[in-house]
Image (cartoon, grey):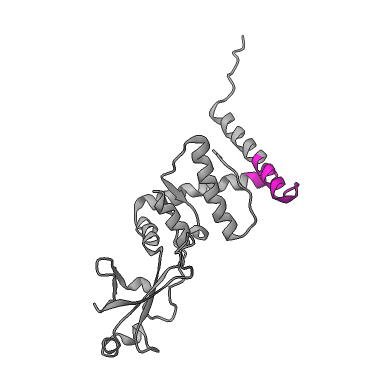
Amino acid sequence: MIVDVEATRSIRQAEVGSTKTMLGRVRARFDLHPERLIADTAYGSGPMLGWLVDRNIKPYIPVLDKAGRTDGTWSRGDFEWDPENNQYICPEGQPLKQFRRNYSDPNHGPTGKGVAKYQALKHTRQACPSKMKCCPKADTRKITREEHEDARQVPRDIAKTKQYAISMRLRKKVEMLFAHLKRILGLGRLRLRGPWGANDEFLLAATAQNLRKLAKFFPAPQQTRKA
């Protein structure tokens, strides 16, 4: 069932913001406290995942990660994070210590732009037998860690579970509702202008969709006929 509607422009920032709005509105109106959120990679940014984890909502979302490498060298995911010592451990067992931490805003605001940088010792990297797979064009290897990296690790761990695969299949059933809105209810093109008009049209279409589902759950009583 569709419990809330928030129409936005087709940009990622607006869609992510509408998710926060709907979650707060559903909690205030219906006292619904979701345990998990299933979405695509567009919602897998660090600030969004941090926002969900802080509210005890499990993110069943692929992480939006651009740290992967395509040149055959080790990416950040190949380095093991050691939270107790605040360092990374390379595949050869050598530590990368923190040497710098920058913030774009002095008050460390809700946008969360904190970035910590970790670096291996220069003489250690020069003598490493795997230097060509680690940093072939640099004297030493450097790794950045975002402020919400702990929250980003939560969906990575969830993606390894069996429940994650089940949730991805359930997500397809939810996406079918949008296909029905376009194909059956004729919502392929909006007729009302402006964000308020689009929101009203989506709300009416969602209401009709819910009524169709309720009609299937509670069919009309059949009248008995005499022979």
Q: Residue at x 75, y 46 (%)?
A: 192
Question: The C terminus appears in which quarter of the rendering?
Answer: top right
Residue 213 visible, this angle: yes
Q: Can residue 227 be seen by looking at this rendering? A: no
Q: Which residues are magenta?
A: 181-203
**Residue found 49% across the figure and 62% down from its top:** 111
Q: Is residue 128 left or right of residue 103?
A: left
Does 191 lie within the magenta span?
A: yes
* Residue 171, percent from left and from top: 49, 49
Count of residue discs: 0
Question: In the image, is residue 99 above or below residue 194?
Answer: below
For this rendering, which residue is in front, 123 or 136? 123
Quadrant occupied by the N terminus: top right
* Residue displayed at 43% across by 81% down: 71
User: Vertically, is 116 above or below 123?
Assistant: above
Residue furthest front as drawn: 107
Q: Looking at the picture, how far across and down is residue 31, in whole percent?
A: 47, 36
Rendered residue at 39%/57% (across/down)? 155
Tell me which corner region of the image, top left, top right, bottom left or bottom right, holds residue 81.
bottom left
* Residue 87 appears left or right of 26: left
